[in-house]
Image (cartoon, grey):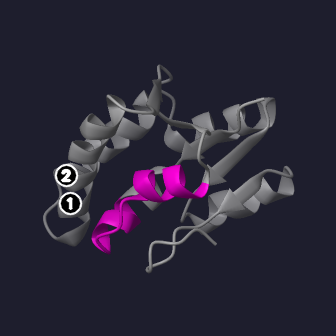
Amino acid sequence: MLTKILIDTSSIVYGFEYRKNVFDTVSETFPGAGVYVSKGIIKELDKLSANKGAKGAAARLSRLALADNASKRLRIESSTKSGDSWIIGSAKKSDTIVITNDTALAKRLKSLNVKVFKLAKDGRLR
């Protein structure tokens, strides 16, 4: 069965704040895995894009990367739920790995026995 990787808004933005592309990192670390974001995640990125400063700039860069990766291996799920709700619901249903830099979400997922990775400043998953 194909491993399903869900990427949270926090890791996407964090990566671009440190000039790291989480989509590339995931593809290199888990070759052949299905990589997913939801429309809810994209909506969160759009809201963050309106901000000034590093976080807003990172969100705008991430939207460009999403557009580039959407034509490749990235899959966009139609759910418009909040990112956390979509991730928790999807992770409970299948053999899934979640990439998040949100400590509270990571803790909740680990309590559900979901495998969680965090994107480090050096661009590696830990």
Residue depicted at x 31% and y 46%: 45
Residue depicted at x 61% and y 51%: 30
**Number of numbered markers:** 2
Q: Residue furthest top?
A: 78
Q: Quadrant of the C terminus?
A: bottom right
Q: Secondary structure at mark 2?
A: helix
> Based on the displayed image, in which of its 4 quarters is residue 110 positioned?
bottom right
Residue depicted at x 28% and y 70%: 19
Q: Please give the residue where the numbered disc 2 appears in the rendered image.
A: 60
Label 1 amino acid?
Answer: Gly
Q: Secondary structure at mark 1?
A: helix
Report x, y in % for residue 101: 54, 65
> Based on the displayed image, in which of its 4 quarters is residue 88 positioned?
top right
Q: Is residue 54 magenta?
A: no
Is 37 situated left or right of 20 in this image?
right
Q: Is residue 28 magenta?
A: yes
Is 117 situated left or right of 58 in this image?
right
Question: Which mark is on residue 104?
Answer: none
Q: Please give the residue where the numbered disc 1 appears in the rendered image.
A: 56
Viewer-proximal residue among 97 and 34: 34
Which residue range is magenta in the image? Answer: 13-29
Label 2 amino acid?
Answer: Arg
